[in-house]
Image (spheres, helix red, strand yellow):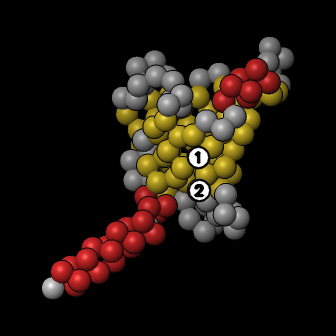
Amino acid sequence: MHKTIVMMLLAVVSSSAATAGQYSYSCAVENVYLVDDKGRIRENANLTGIMRGERFSVDRVTGKVTGDRIPALPLVKSSVLAPGGKANSFKSYFQGYNFVSYVEVYEYKDDEGKPFVLHDGDSIFSGFCE
């Protein structure tokens, strides 16, 4: 009897672990960019050095983004704009009291790591999600 219960628990735990990626992305920052006074996008080398490797998560159901440094301010609202799929990107926005941010994950890419771009205030982040 105990053996049966343990086997059932293991099956439930392993099946929920296998589907975790269906409900959220885990993302890592590789680069940070900004728009300069001439309207050009360029790398913000100082911020890239600080933020490279910084991780955040995106809830694929609510669009909520959570992490230690991204977003920089508390969220008030989030929403999924497009759920993504084999031919489209996942898109969501999130907002605080005085900011609106946008994230797009190129889910349709066949690679294990899915590229992302996140616009957060005056910074543009890029990297990969799992």
Question: Which residue extends farthest top?
Answer: 37
Residue at the location (34% across, 69% down)?
A: 13
Where residue 43 appears, x then y in whole percent? 80, 28
Classify residue 15 as left or right of residue 34: left
As drawn, the label of residue 27 is 1
Residue 130 at x, y percent in the picture: 59, 56
Q: Residue at x 66, y 30 (%)?
A: 51
Q: Are marks 2 and 1 in contact (CB under 8 Å)?
A: yes
Q: Based on the displayed image, in which of its 4 quarters is residue 113 positioned?
A: bottom right
Which residue position is annotated with label 2?
130
44 w.r.t. 64: above or below: above
- Residue at the spot 61% in from the left edge and 59% down from the top edge: 107
The amino acid marked with disc number 1 is Cys
Query: Which amino acid, by three-letter code, is at mark 2?
Result: Glu
SS label for mark 1: strand
Residue situated furthest front in the rendering: 2
Q: Nearer the viewer, residue 128 or 89?
A: 128
Residue 35, can we see it?
no
Pinpoint residue 93: horizontal percent, then vertical percent: 49, 39
* Image quarter of residue 108: bottom right
Mark earlier in primary sequence (2, 1): 1
| SS label for mark 2 | loop
36 sits to left or right of 82: right
Residue displayed at 74% across by 35% down: 31
From the viewer's side, name the closer residue of 100 and 48: 48
Gap between marks 2 and 1 measured at Cα: 6 Å
